[in-house]
Image (spheres, rainbow, N blue to C red):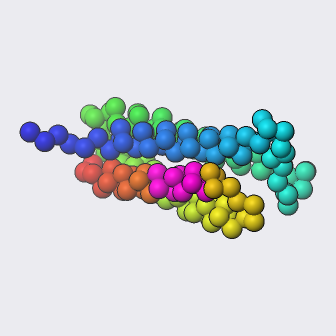
Amino acid sequence: MASAIDHGLRLRSLWIAWLLAMLFHVNLGLMPLFHGISPEIDSQVPVARLPLLFGAMLGYFLLPLAALVLIAYATSDPSHPGRWRRWRLGHFWLSVVYTLTNIPHLAADILVPDARIDQVVLMLAMVVIGLLINREGWLWWRLGP
């Protein structure tokens, strides 16, 4: 007997993989520090605006964490599937936004003059994982009430 696909489990696993890849992307960027090389980039952001940038990055990291928690709650509430329908739609669009923000980042990593292949490969992995999240999010949303 065939069992139903657990899109929630797939989504949680994919978001965790995406978050780990994001953390490793930052870690790889800082790796030169351990070899006496500065990882400093030529920033165009004024120092006074850095707190806003750091806050935006914190939000960018926290939204997938919130998505993980909400997916866990939605998939563990089988007696009220309709209650989570709007969240499933919202999650799908959230995943699309994240994929759309990763594509220009991948392009920027490719086009930067001193591009590192490890960063490009990792960003490519994040885009692929993002596309898988989009697909599973779409299937989860379209799944009944």
Most foreground residue, 33 or 4 = 33
Residue 139's image quarter?
bottom left
Does the magenta portion include 129?
Answer: yes
Side of 69 where 109 appears, left or right: right
Most foreground residue, 126 or 30 = 30
Q: Which stretch appears magenta? A: 120-130
Residue 105 image offset from top left, x and y in percent: 64, 60
Q: Is residue 47 visible?
A: yes
**x 73%, y 40%: residue:** 31
Residue 76 image offset from top left, x and y in percent: 34, 32
Residue 16 image offset from top left, x and y in percent: 49, 38
- Classify the position of the N terminus by image quarter: top left
Q: Residue furthest front?
A: 35
**How many tags in the picture?**
0
**x 42%, y 39%: residue:** 13
Q: Is residue 73 above or below residue 29?
A: above
Q: Residue furthest left?
A: 1
Side of 62 where 134 appears, left or right: left
Residue 11 image offset from top left, x and y in percent: 40, 44
Q: Is residue 93 above or below residue 10?
A: below
**x 52%, y 45%: residue:** 18
Type of secondary structure dominating the magenta stretch: helix
Side of 66 where 109 appears, left or right: right
Side of 89 where 80 appears, left or right: left
